[in-house]
Amino acid sequence: MGAIQQILLGGGQLGLVPVAPTIGAATGGNTSASITFTNNFDNGSPITQNRMTSSPGGFTNTGTSPIVVSGLTNGTAYTFTATATNANGISLSSSASNSVTPAAGAVVPAAPTIGTASRASGTSCSVTFTNNSNGGSAITVNTATASPGGLTGTGTSPITVSGLTNGTAYTFTVTATNAIGVSPASAASNAATPATVPGVPSDVGITINKKLFQPTFPVIFSFAAPADDGGAPVTFYDLSVPEFGGASGSSPLSITATYVLNQSYTFTLVAVNEVGVGSASVHTLTPNT
């Protein structure tokens, strides 16, 4: 009762430890094992540490999933439980993992064989690869690393690396991890450049060459490149108006309009790059005499 009172007086309310993690799969290595898990509800206080414990032996390690527990005895079967810690204390243990038996002879995986890097959506690129020998211990994760910048992504092939800078060329290497450790990196991929569609054309100027009693006349648009080309050069510009068609190319662009008293026309100007069509600069004009 006294301990509960101290908690109530110190924090104003009784703090709760996290819910026990959900255990995943254990994979044996050479005097080690790699174990995955998933955290559950932290009960309002962030989880600051996860710990994995072996049975028998009580060997432990901390970290994020997967946790590698070392110092095991080859030929002995082990199961593992995980706990989560927050500011209020340590959770109950998870259920036990599957049983694994570490074995001698396991080594880190061979370097993966790199495939192809290509532009993905937004500020990301996608990288394909093929795993090779797992070194006698199952591969638990693959990691792709961008150069320059060192941004990473994990998963199976293809891996997407996000947060890149549009217009910057990147190459990628891939590693494989098992219970023993991390493989050498693959060879570097081809260069890939993330990009998106361009922005709105800037500095738009409009000239209407309408003369008295002239039934048709040119409407001329002059403009400059968008402030942001999306990371890929603008290849052309497109000017269109539903009533009179369109024109494509570079500045200036001209469309021949037909005069109708008090008739308004909507002209749309866009920049296009290899990714697609950018945002429009829209202008409604009423070319009266």
Image (cartoon, rainbow, N blue to C red):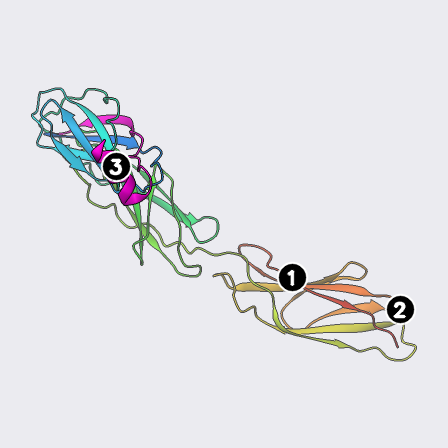
Q: Mark 1 is on which residue type?
A: Ala
Q: Earlier in the sequence, mark 2 or mark 3?
A: 3
Q: Which residue is mark 3?
A: 5
Q: Is residue 84 or residue 13 the one in the foreground?
A: 13
Work out how far the residue at label 2 is from the one at label 3, CA to CA, in angstroms: 82 Å
The span from disc 1 to disc 3 (Cα, nearest Å) is 65 Å
**82 on left or right of 73:** right
Q: In this image, 164 relative to 258: left or right?
A: left
The kind of residue on which mark 3 rests is: Gln
| Residues in magenta, as a range | 1-29
Q: Is residue 15 magenta?
A: yes
Where, quadrant-wise, is the C terminus in this rendering? bottom right
What secondary structure is found at the residue carrying circle 2? loop
Q: Marks 1 and 2, Cα distance to the nearest angstrom?
A: 24 Å
Coordinates of residue 25 in the picture (x, y in percent): 26, 26
- What residue is pinned by disc 1? 280
Quadrant placement of the N terminus: top left
Between 214 and 84, the residue placed more toward the observer is: 84
**Mark 1 element type:** loop
Q: Is residue 50 magenta?
A: no
